[in-house]
Amino acid sequence: MNTSALTSTALYRIGAVSKTTGIPVSTLRIWETRYGAFTPVKTEGKQRLFAEHDVSKALLLKLLSQNGHAISTIANLDLAQLRRMSNLPHNTPQSLAAPGQPVSLAVVGLSMANRIESKKFAAGLKQNQIKVTDVLVDLATAANAELAQQPQVLLVKVNTLQTAVHTDIQALINTHQFAQTIVVYNFAPENVVQAMKFSGLIVRREPISDIELAELLQSVLFVDPARAQEFGTTGAVIAARKYSDATLSRVAGISTNVLCECPRHVAELIAQLASFEEYSQECLNRNAEDAHLHAYLRSISGSARSLFENALEKIAAHEGIDLREGAATNQRQGAV
C-alpha cells in the first residue's frame, strides 16, 4: 500500500461515511462490491478508507436512487455526470447531506394544500419531509393539468365520493403513475368507498387531525428506503399492490421445477402481508390514539410486501410463470 497517498487527502472509514451520508454500511458495501461505485484504499488490516470524492459520490447516488434511478445504471458515472443528472451546482455539497430527500406530493384541493404546507403539519412528519410540487383546485382542473414534476403521492380532498369521482381519480393515476394515492372525503356511499379501497386507494373520512394525516402519509413510506434499494426497489414511497389475490392464488397452485416450492410460499406470503397491510390501515382509520403504531405497522407490512413482490417477479422470470392478471391457470410462459 502506498502510505503517501493516505496523507495527501482526507480519508474516512466506512462507518464515518455511513454516518455522514445516512447510507447503511451494508448498502455502501453492496454499491462498492456489486456495482463498482467506489474504489476505496484498503489498509494492511483490510480497512476500507474512502476519499472525499467518494463521500460526494455516495451522497449523489443516494439522491438519484431516491429519485428513481437504478443504482446499476448510475454507479459507474463520475461526479460531473452525477451532478448534471441531479441539477446540483458544484459548490453546494451541504444540500446533499439532508437525512432524506422530500417525498413529492400532488394535492387536489386548496384547503388540503394549505394544511400540508403549514409549519404545524410539518412538525408532525418527524424525520420525513413532504414537498408539494403541484396544487390543483379540483379534479376537473387536475384532469387537464400538466404537472411540474413526477409526484410520488397523490392526495385528494373532496366533499363527496361518487362513482364518477372514483373514475376521475383513477384516470389521474393512469396518466401520472403515482406510487400511492390518498383520498380524504366527507360523505360517500359505502359501496364506492369499498370499490376505491379494492382498487388500491387509501380512503379516509373527515374529520382527520393534522397528526393523523401526517401518520397516514408516513404509512406509505418505506421504513428504510436505503435497504429497499439493495433489493431492487427505488424511492421512499411504497408502491401500490401489484398482484391481486386471484393472481397470487393461481401462482401458488402452479407446479414448478423449484422443489422447495418457493413460488407458492412467496405468493402466500405476499397475500398475507397485503391482508395485514389492509388491516393496519383500517386500524389507522379507526383508532386515532394508536395512529403512530398502526402507521408504523402498515409501513412495515407494505415494505415487506413490496420487496416480496420484487422477489416473486425474479422467481417468475426464472420459472417462466406468467404474472399477468387473468392468465390461464397452471400456465407457464412458453408452455405448450
Image: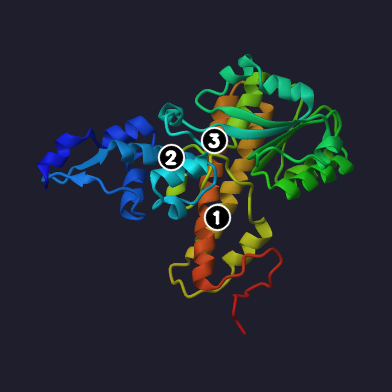
Nearer-the-camera pick, 96 or 88: 88
In the rendered structure, which amino acid carries the disc numbered 2? Leu
Q: Which mark is residue 309?
A: 1
In the rendered structure, which amino acid carries the disc numbered 3? Leu
Q: Nearer the viewer, mark 3 or mark 2?
A: 2
Pointer 3 residue: 297
Residue that appears at 37% across and 37% down: 56
Q: Residues within 10 Å of mark 1 (few under 14, many from 20)?
A: some
- Tell me residue 311's x, y (percent): 49, 58
Of the two numbered discs 1 and 2 on the same chain, state the one appearing first in sequence.
2
CB atoms of marks 3 and 1 within 8 Å: no
Secondary structure under the numbered disc 3 in the rendered image = helix
Residue that appears at 52% across and 23% down: 126
Between the C-alphas of marks 3 and 1, the distance is 18 Å
Q: Residues within 10 Å of mark 3 (few under 14, many from 20)?
A: many
| Picture quadrant where residue 325 is located | bottom right
- Tell me residue 288's x, y (percent): 64, 22
Left or right: 303 in relation to 329 = left
Left or right: 253 in relation to 30 = right
Quadrant that contains the C terminus? bottom right
Of the two numbered discs 3 and 2 on the same chain, state the one appearing first in sequence.
2
Pointer 2 residue: 60
- Above or below, 59 relative to 312: above
Could one spot residue 15 in this view of the protein?
yes
Of the two numbered discs 3 and 1 on the same chain, state the one appearing first in sequence.
3
Secondary structure under the numbered disc 2 in the rendered image = helix
